[in-house]
Structures are given as C-alpha cells and as structure tokens.
Image: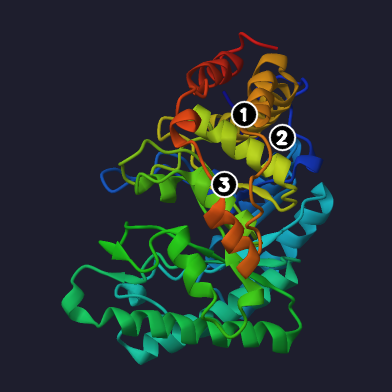
Amino acid sequence: MTDVLGKPLARERTSDQFAPQKSDKFTFGLWTVGNRGRDPFGDAVRNSIPPTRIVEKVAELGGYGISLHDNDLVPIDATPALRDKIVSEFKQALKDYDLQVPMATVNLFYHPVFKDGAFTSNDPRVRNFAIQKTMSAMDLGHDLGAKIFVLWGGREGVEIDACRNAEDGIKRMREALNFLCEYSVSQGYDYKFALEAKPNEPRSDIYFPTSGHMLAFLYTLDHPELVGLNPEVAHEQMSGLNFYHGVAQAIEAGKLFHIDLNDQKPGRYDQDLRFGSETIKGMFYLVKLLEESGYSGPRAFDAHAYRTEDEEGVWDFAYGCMRTYNMLKYKAKLFAQDAEIQGILNELKSRFGPVPVDTTKFSADTAAKLKATPFDINAIAGPGLNYERLDQLVIDLLLGFRG
C-alpha cells in the first residue's frame, strides 16, 4: 500500500529494549538498502530509492550513519555542476536527519574498463585511471566527513593465471596503496584505509582472498600504520572459514578499522543475507567479541533485502539487521551473568591452576627451568573438559531457555 505521494505506508515496528539507537553506531551503505534485487538471472524488482530518502529512513529506524561508493551518490559520467548539486542535497539531508558518513569507498569493479582489474590491470592506463578515480572518491568522502576509506578489490584477480605473474599483481597493489596513503597524508585527510578480502566472485580468483592474506600484506606497505582491515562475514564464510576467529586476529593486531556485517550459507556465492539470519551461533560469538573487545567503530551492515521484497520490505530488512545485533548483544550479557556457564569456566580455571613456568619472555634461565619441569601428561589428559555441557548451555541461552 502507498500514500498519496506513491510512497509505501510506514509499517509499525516494535519499540522495545532491542530497538536501535544512534549510540549503537549502526550504518548502512547506499548500495545495501538501495539494492534493487537484480541478479545474474533476473532484472531489478524494486525502484531506485533516492539517497536523500535512504538518509531519512535510516535515521527514522535508529541508524547512525551512511556509507557509500563514489558512484552510489554521483554517477560516473556526472558533470561538475550535477555532482555539486547531488552532493549539496545529500549533505543537507545528513544535516537534517543528524546522520554521519563514517566510511567512504570507491567503485573499481562495475565499469567495463575494470574488466581485467583496476590497480593490478595489465594496462597501465587502467591502473592510472583507477588511482585517479580513487583520489576523487577520497576527496568526496572527506567532503562528507568520512574518516575510514575501504578498498575492496573486486576485479583484482584473474580467470587464467597465464595472463600475468601473480607477483606483479601484488607489487602493483602495493604501489597503488603506497601512492594513495601518501595522497591522503599530503591532503591532510587523516584517513584510515581498511582492506576488504574476498576469495572469488566476480573474478574466478581474487588476490588477497582472506583477511589473513590482507593482514600479512599490509605490513609490507610504506605506511602500515594507516592501513587495517574491513572483514566481511560473507566473504570469509564463502571460504568455509570462521569469521569470529578472523575478526579476533584483526582486533588482537590492532587492525580492525571497520567491519561489514551480514550472513551467509557456507560454500555458496556471496549472498549478503540479513545479519544473523543463518549462522546464529557464529554471529553470537562475533557480537560478543565486538562488544567485549572495546571495538568502537561502526557496525556496518553490508547486506541486501531478499529479491521478494518491495521498498517496505527493505526497511523491514534494515530494522531486522539492527535488532538482531542488539538481541545478540543482550545474550552476550546474559552469558556473562549465567551462574552455570560461568561456573564451568571458573572450574576449568581453578583446575588448570597457575602457569608452571612463565614463558611470556625468553631467557636462558626460563628455558632451562622449563626443560627441567616434570609433567604427568597422562594425569593432565585424563579429566574431561565439560565442553559438551558448556555448548548446550549456550544453545539453551540463544533459544531463550535460560536467563
């Protein structure tokens, strides 16, 4: 149903302890709620939603911010006058609805010029254009207040390995990132760059396919202090990896600069499903990690509504992402307060006792002491650890039968 202006009538949504607030720092990309439901086998099923309306609706639902690729807002062929008009209207909407733009990025994958890569293309003209386009996107992001710049190399890969030496792809990526870091510094933009990994799709193989690959690579850059990660749930789970573990490694390294939340059926194409709609236990541990680690960045949802939905269904999807996160955040608090769960964990700590020899730092004396320490490995191996019971208690908690 629509109103007299042809806009869908607002659906009443629950307002309770799990309703999103701006303080939750939930963000959506223009490309996420703006997705029209097109796929490789079918055309769009929804009309385009203007960026200013997306700002209005995200604010209405309790969101904190909007992120964007350059061409989500400004068409690639826009004249300078049209660009200025679009940006001015968008900035006014952000001000009117009190939304932030914490993150900006660049589209280096859609136009045919990037069919064989952007920063890693064999054609030096394409490589130059990709850096030029990225600098312009950085200018736009800075103008909108963004402090994080995400780089996803969707076309940085190959279908056939004969086309280039893989080492050249790595070197070209490094050269581009070094240049862009220097550009950011020279302009006083104060950007933190967040690299986003993906194993495949749209290329058969994409360079730096996991967050671990990206983490190793960024330390080879001229400015590793400016570069971190933007891990995405679906991208890691496409490879069958545990996203929670990857995020924990990024946090431990001080390199979680941004995070893309969605969901994914393992082993499938990139589905970008509503957050928490499939792998509920894994997303519980992820939320628990983010909340307990002190991560203070945006909780960004990079997901799409089902192709079955009209615009009102898009807002159901967006609200659902945020509400599920808050419900899992609440469950994490119950986990910490649950007497039986904490009793098992405390019993294990008590049973294990203190560390026999402190090996946090090496010394010859410590090494000699450790070599001389006797261990009754059969006695250590004997008792069960009660993990079956612990895991079932977590399931009970998530299904609402505890707390």
| Residue type highlighted by circle 2 | Leu
On the image, the x and y values in percent for residue 99 come to 77, 51
Query: Where does label 3 land, which residue?
Result: 49
In the displayed structure image, the side of residue 60 where residue 33 appears, left or right: left
Q: In what element is the residue under mark 1?
A: helix
Q: Residue 359, relative to residue 337: is it above or below?
A: below
Q: Is residue 77 visible?
A: no
User: Which residue is depicted at the point 60% across and 66% down?
Assistant: 228
Nearest the viewer among 284 and 125 is 284
Nearest the viewer among 98 and 381 is 381
On the image, the x and y values in percent for residue 199 come to 35, 58
Of the 4 image quadrants, the one containing the C terminus is: top right
Please tell me whether mark 3 or mark 1 is closer to you in this view: 1
Query: Where does label 2 land, which residue?
Result: 61
Q: In what element is the residue under mark 3?
A: loop
**CB under 8 Å between discs 3 and 1:** no
Please tell me whether mark 2 or mark 3 is closer to you in this view: 2
User: How far is disc 2 from disc 3 in space, using C-alphas?
Assistant: 16 Å
Residue 348: image quadrant is top right
Query: Where does label 1 land, which residue?
Result: 324
User: How far is disc 2 from disc 1 in space, using C-alphas?
Assistant: 14 Å
**Which of the labelled discs sits on residue 59, or is there none?**
none
Residue 85: image quadrant is bottom right
- Looking at the image, tell me whether mark 3 or mark 1 is earlier in sequence order: 3
- Looking at the image, tell me whether mark 2 or mark 1 is earlier in sequence order: 2
Mark 1 Cα shell of 10 Å, populated few (<14), some (14-19), many (≥20):
many
| Residue type highlighted by circle 1 | Thr
| Residue type highlighted by circle 3 | Ile
Nearest the viewer among 385 and 163 is 385
On the image, the x and y values in percent for residue 251 come to 63, 55
Q: In what element is the residue under mark 2?
A: loop
Of the 4 image quadrants, the one containing the N terminus is: top right
